[in-house]
Every structure is written in structure tokens, then in C-alpha cells.
Image (spheres, rainbow, N blue to C red):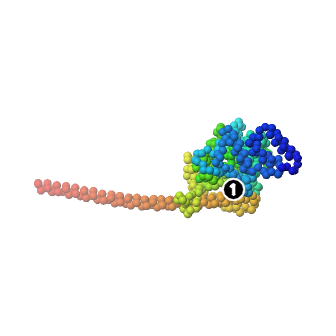
Amino acid sequence: LVPTGIKKTTIIISSIKMLTRTSLSTSFLSILPCLLSIITTHIPPCTADQQVDDIISWINHLPNGYFNDKLAINPMSNAPFLPATSSSSSPMGVFAKEDIEAEELLMRIPREAFIHVLDMEERKEVDDTWSAFYHNMCLLTKKLKEEMETGEDSPRAPYVRFLKSQQRGQIPALWSTPSKNLLRPLLPYEDPPTEAELANHTPRSNSVDWIDDHLKSTCISPTDPSDEQIVALVKQRGYDDALIPLWDMFNHANGRYTNTRQTSVRDAEGVRVYASKEIRAGDEVFASYDRCADCEFVNLVWGTPEIFRDFGFVEPYPHRYHLEERIWFEIVEVDEKDGDKGNDGDGSGFRVLWDDGITWPDVDNYGNPDREGIEFLEREVTKFESALARMSEVPEEERGMVSQYISTVIFDYKLAIAAAERDLELEEEDEDSSDDDEEEDEVEEDEDEDEDEEGDYVDDDDEYHEEEEEDDDEENENESGRDEL
């Protein structure tokens, strides 16, 4: 098997002899091809399928560990940038092999399988600032680095092996300089870039520079690319304070696509995942990255741009945008079979939902954008279209995702502008109608007043006639008296 030299062969034979002195466990037999592929260059590398099978077997052998055999974890053949192969770097997806009933248990991952810092005294409670968030991320980064250095001796070796095989550069923070320069003004940031930075297309932004600004030197080596990759894995696959095997292989979707619910990852016994509705054989099984048991209000301030920033992909609809200019909206797909033809009624297939109590019920809602808000969105479209015209600057391997993100935002913003324009026109029509009604009311009030005045005149006339009649009666009485006299 190893014609390149006796040294490798001796290592393999010695290792096998040592292991055969004890019982050859099923777990060792399952990883033997992976070990051989590491030592030799003549055996194909471990496939993603092999690594996933190792993790599932390991989880099922843990106390309280369980992975439903109706599920299959397969490579995603249509992922951007990657060939349609089952290499260990291919993105994964979870699919139903058989029909699954609502509320059926999909998996149970005990905490001992986690790579986490949930119990560490150094861990801080996350508040409204970023400092505690990055502090905890640093702790988890160091923990994962320790696990990777331990390697096959780690009690979580199957999962560590899988994480080591992940392709570098899956999130914007690790993309090329041209891609970062293009995306900085187009992604959410902590501090807005200066005018000079925007003019030179070199602004710094938390959206793509957060590793450099918050973790290099203070947490990881400023010159070691492998440290950057570990940080990226924590950001992309972690649940703030924990990395959870298998659960991090579920792809994200919201709305009608979401078909799971889970318990808190902070539960002492681990995490349990259930089917939230019936899942048909062949359907993909999704998790929500921002509407989860531990997400709290994340879904209100975290939307499509944040998903792209942190995970490197454009999420399926619904799309959500929370903009600094007091604009919040969702774009959802509508089903024409249900009679919903979208905002404009022309069968566009989408509906725009504004912040009219969807967010914090007890806080002043943003409502529909006014004319200034619409003009802001129009300027944003111009900015994104200008960026789209510069796509030739982006390396080819990153161009697909960058272009998809920019094109998606342009499409969504134009839908929002059209919906806002229609809503504003309706409001103006209502105001005009209300003004007309007020004018009609005023005219009617004037007419009523005229009638009242006319009525008062008639009453006075009646009094005059009554007085005349009284005088006549007195005269008649006097005449009668004179007659009697």
C-alpha cells in the first residue's frame, strides 16, 4: 500500500499491532481508513459521508445520545464555489429518508459531546455591548484550538476531525481584500465608515474586519492563518458559547421552510431537536439561526444582511431588514393558490410587511416609511447597483456569493420602495378624502346655522303676532265694558 518507503509502512504495521493487542473496537475500524489516508498518500482522503457516519456512530454510543435513523446527512451538490463531490469540505444538508411525524424526536446531543465554555467562570453574560460577546468568542476559540491540538486523543475526536476538514474562507471576514472592500459599505457595521474611506473604497467595518479589530493580538496570533480559521468556525458553526456536533449541519431557513424546534443549548442534559410539523421523505430538514430557543430578540434586529455577514450565504425567503433610518420590513413569499397576489396584486409572489407592531409591542413602532424613508431606500439601491458594476474586481471563486447578495438586496429594496409608494399614495388619498369630508361637514354646519337663524326669525314673528292678539283682546274687553256702561 505504501511504495514510497518502509518508514510509513512500519508506522502503520506497528500501530495496528499495538491496537490488536486490545480488542479492535467498532469505532477504531470506522476511523481506520481515515488514519491510513492521513499517513499515506495513496489512499483517497476521508469523504464527508465517512466523517458524518463516524460522528453519528459516536453520538449514538454516548449515554443519552440519539440520532434518528430516518435522517440522512448528505453533501450539498449545488453549493456555490464547490464541486458536486462528497469531499470533506462540501457543505452538508440534513434530509428525511422517510416520513417523519410532527413532534417526533430527531436527535438528542448530550452536553459531553459539546465543545463549549458554558460552565467556565471566565464566561461573561452578554449585554448590549460587543465586549462580552467577543470575550466569550475568544474563550470558545481557545477551547476549540485545544481540542484540535489534542486531535485523536480528544473524547470528541470524530467531531474535531470533521471541523479540521472544513474549507477555509466560507465567511466574508476571510474573503479576499477586493471582496472586503466592496462589501464594507454594504453590510451592517458598528461604526459607519468615514467619507474618505468610502471615497477610497477602503473603509473599515465590523462586518468584515471584526477578527482583526477584536481578536487578533488579544486572542489569536496576528500572523497564523489557522487561528483565523478556528475563529471563523466558532462564528459560523457555534451557538455563542458552544459548538454542537450534528446540530451545526442543519441548514438555515425561516417561514414555511422551518420544520424543527429545539430546547435550549444551555440545558444541562444537552439539546433535543424535534420535528415542528410533518416532514415528507426527501424534504430537507431546516433549523432557524435567528428564531431559536436561545435567540430571544435576535430575529428583530438580525436579518438577511447579518446572515450573509456571519455565515456567507443568502438565506431563502422570508428576508428581513432592520435599517438605522427607522426602517424595518420583511419580504415574504405568498401563495397565489390562497388568493394572495402580493402587495401590488399583479402576482409578483411577494408581500412586504412593515413594522406595525411586529417588533417590540410596547415600543414606538417604525411603521411605513415616509417620503424621506423612500428616498433613503432609493439612494441605497443606487449604492448597491454601483457596487454590482464593480464585480470584476472580485475573485471568481467569491464572485457568485457577492453578486447574489448584492442582487438580492437590490431586488428586495425595489419591492419595498414600490410597496411604500403605494402605501403612501393610499395615505394621501385617505387624507384628501378626509379633507373633502371635513369640507362637506363644514358646509353642512354652515347650512344648519343658516336654518337656525331663519328659525329664530320666525319665532320672533310669532311672538309679535301673539302680542297683537293680546292687544286686540284688551280692546275688545274695553269696548264690552263701555257697552255695558
Please give the count of numbered marks on the rendered protein. 1
The answer to whether residue 26 shows anywhere in this view is yes
Q: Looking at the picture, how far across and down is residue 480, in whole percent?
A: 14, 56
In the displayed structure, 23 sits above or below 192; it is above
Determine the residue positioned at 61% across, 54% down: 318
Residue drawn at 54 percent across, 59 percent down: 337
- The disc labelled 1 sits on which kind of residue? Leu
Instruction: For label 1, count other residues whose C-alpha is less than 10 Å away and answer few (under 14), some (14-19) or many (20+).
Output: some
Q: Which residue is rendered at x = 78% and y = 47% of the image? A: 33
Q: Quadrant of residue 186?
A: bottom right
Classify the position of the C terminus by image quarter.
bottom left
Question: Is 336 in front, or is 1?
Answer: 1
Tell me residue 263's x, y (percent): 62, 42
Q: Left or right? Give the position of 152 relative to 458.
A: right
Residue 378 in the image, given as x and y percentages of width and height? 63, 60
Asked if residue 207 is positioned above or below residue 429 in the image, the reply reads: above
Q: Nearer the viewer, residue 70 or 188?
A: 70
Instruction: Specify whether 156 is left or right of 347.
Output: right
> Horizontal and vertical percent for residue 326?
61, 52
To which residue does mark 1 refer?
186
Q: Is residue 300 visible?
A: no
